[in-house]
Image (cartoon, rainbow, N blue to C red):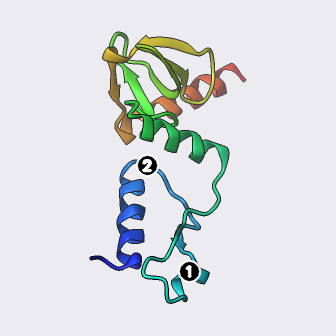
Amino acid sequence: MRSTEEVVESLRQALVDAGIVLPSLCVDPVTGASEEPFALVDLGRCNVRVAERLASVVRGERPAVGTHAVDARDGRVGEVLAHDGGEVRLRPVGGGREWDCPAASLVAARPEEVMRARLRRTNHESARS
């Protein structure tokens, strides 16, 4: 059987792989110091965005809420806001009008695609000024 510390580290890595960071994830100090055979894992506190992403991952939604995706129909990059049946609600990188996209038409956005979309939005805004 693995130690509680090993299990906590395994959970931490799995969460990071899913794009989730729980900064105060740790072994509960009270039960960890007791004679109980199994210490408790303290998941700690997180903000609403992290909680929403965690719920999305646990529900098995792909792409998860809070991640970025590309609408393969037209190449737009957006942040995933919600899932509703087979539709996914997206918000353009940098803000703007939200849109719905069939989940089957989405692919995960690569970091360079997100950066390119942010740069395009910044350039567009500076040209209007």
Asked if residue 53 is positioned above or below residue 109 in the image, the reply reads below
Q: Position of residue 101 (x, y in %)?
A: 43, 12
* Snapshot quadrant of residue 109: top left
Would residue 53 appear left or right of 11 to someone viewing this image? right
Give the residue at x 43% y 41%: 58
Compare residues 29 and 95 and report the one nearer the observer: 29
Q: Secondary structure at mark 1?
A: helix
Circle 1: residue type: Thr
On the question of residue 115 being in view, the answer is no
Extreme residue toward the front, this view: 36
On the question of residue 51 being in view, the answer is yes
Q: Secondary structure at mark 2?
A: loop
Q: Earlier in the sequence, mark 1 or mark 2?
A: 2
Front disc: 1 or 2 = 1
Which label is found at residue 31?
1
- Quadrant, the C terminus: top right
Which label is found at residue 3?
none
Asked if residue 56 is positioned above or below residue 129 in the image, the reply reads below
Residue for badge 2: 19
Give the residue at x 38% y 34%: 60
